[in-house]
Image (spheres, rainbow, N blue to C red):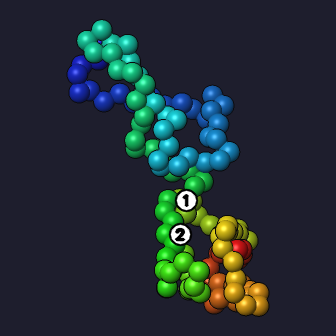
């Protein structure tokens, strides 16, 4: 018997072969659930809300200097990876349905000046 309000720890050793999904674990995931058939109060599958983020973005924010449709604007992107980014890692930022007005430009120079791991942006 486990008393009410008691904490229970479950540990699965690496040797058990448990694999984290190749796409990582996002903090907003709903695939990890807990349920019980306890006689004193069964609980249906309920998402676990406190999960360590693995190989995912912990936060991303994009803002525009002139937020007006159809007009030129500067772009500011801030990202927070849940894992360390090592030298040689790349982050690609894609702006689908965006266009450029004027000759193509390379953002690589701007990104390098910011000492950023972000090396490519497309639109």
| Mark 1, secondary structure of its residue | strand
Q: Residue furthest front?
A: 70
Q: Residues within 10 Å of mark 1 (few under 14, many from 20)?
A: some
Q: Position of residue 65 (x, y in %)?
A: 49, 85
**In this figure, what is the number of numbered marks?**
2
Q: Residue furthest top?
A: 39
Task: Give the answer, above or below, for where 111 lies relative to 93.
Answer: below
Left or right of 80? Residue 34 is left
Task: Give the answer, above or below, for where 101 lies relative to 50.
Answer: below
Q: Which residue is mark 2?
A: 79
Q: Nearer the viewer, residue 3 or 20?
A: 20
Task: Give the answer, above or below, for where 36 lies relative to 122.
Answer: above
Q: Residue at x 26, y 26 (%)?
A: 6
- Is the C-beta separation of discs 1 and 2 under 8 Å? yes
Q: Nearer the viewer, residue 17 or 75?
A: 75
Instruction: Choose top left, top right, bottom left or bottom right for residue 94.
Output: bottom right
Q: Position of residue 112 (x, y in %)?
A: 67, 86
Left or right of 70? Residue 87 is right
Q: CA distance from mark 1 to mark 2?
A: 7 Å
Left or right of 33? Residue 99 is right
Q: Which residue is mark 1?
A: 57
């Amino acid at each position: 018997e486990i008393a009410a309000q008691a904490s229970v720890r479950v540990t699965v050793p690496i040797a058990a072969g448990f694999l984290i999904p190749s796409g990582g674990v996002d903090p907003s995931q709903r695939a990890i659930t807990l349920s019980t058939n306890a006689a004193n109060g069964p609980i249906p599958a309920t998402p676990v809300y406190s999960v360590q983020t693995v190989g995912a973005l912990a936060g991303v924010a994009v803002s525009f200097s002139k937020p007006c449709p159809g007009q030129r604007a500067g772009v500011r992107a801030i990202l927070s990876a849940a894992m360390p980014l090592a030298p040689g890692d790349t982050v690609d930022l894609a702006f689908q349905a965006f266009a450029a007005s004027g000759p193509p430009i390379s953002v690589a120079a701007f990104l390098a000046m910011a000492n950023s791991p972000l090396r490519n942006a497309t639109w």
